[in-house]
Amino acid sequence: MTATEMLLFASLVFIPMATCSGPMVRVPRARALIYRAVTGGNPSTAIGVLDLTERNGVVTIIGSVDGLPPGQHGFHVHEFGDVGNGCLAAGNHFNPLRSDHGSPVNSPSRRHVGDLGNIMTPVNDSTLIDIQDSLIAFTGTRGIVGRAFAIHANVDDLGTGGNEGSRTTGNAGSRLACGIIGYVMPGND
């Protein structure tokens, strides 16, 4: 090994080790493959991927979904990790605190845990998702791992519609797509 190669090796191996301020901490990760809803059946072709991390009490959801119609779509966590029957098998919005439907900026007493607001699909482009939420969690009463995301046909009125549909679903309409949230095996990034 030449002196230059040794210097390069040292800079790649030893300097990063020397600059670490403590033990490396693994951030819990989860992922959901998003599938188009198939009425009466189970989906088979993924149209998107959402990656989730949880750090300091905040879950971050980042990813993209293809093939949705342009416009706003309600985006929620539903109670069951089942994507069958047009995503209806995912059940209702995840609501362990038994609150009315609302906006993700509302207090926990004024929103479902699974209320994540709206996502925007531009004309002829992918839907990009980048959400941070401090009410959902990976585990515990508010845990979403093992449940399902659902993307709805309509804009979510965030509980402001003044009717029963608004208080339960935000009048977000039918389910266009869904995906089960599961842990990512460490090292499978």
Image (cartoon, helix red, strand yellow):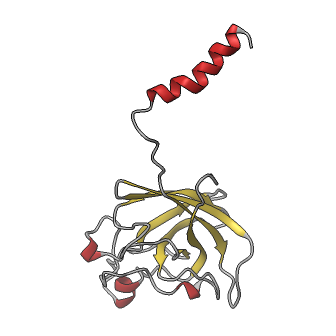
Q: Position of residue 118 (x, y in %)?
A: 46, 67
Q: Position of residue 133 (x, y in %)?
A: 38, 61
Q: Quadrant of the N terminus?
A: top right
Relative to 76, 9 lies left or right: right
Q: Position of residue 90 (x, y in %)?
A: 54, 84
Q: Position of residue 3 (x, y in %)?
A: 68, 8
| Residue 89, quarter of picture | bottom right
Q: Is residue 128 visible?
A: no
Relative to 134, 145 lies left or right: right
Q: Residue at x 33, y 88 (%)?
A: 163
Q: Residue at x 59, y 83 (%)?
A: 82
User: Could you say which is closer to the camera, residue 35 or residue 164?
Assistant: 35
* Residue at the limit of the structure toward the front, as seen here: 1
User: Could you say which is closer to the camera, residue 23 or residue 150?
Assistant: 23
| Residue 4, quarter of picture | top right
Q: Is residue 171 visible?
A: yes
Q: Residue at x 61, y 77 (%)?
A: 176
Relative to 77, 47 lies left or right: right
Q: Is residue 158 above or below residue 22?
A: below
User: Could you say which is closer to the camera, residue 70 or residue 143?
Assistant: 143
Q: Residue at x 35, y 53 (%)?
A: 56
Relative to 23, 90 lies left or right: right
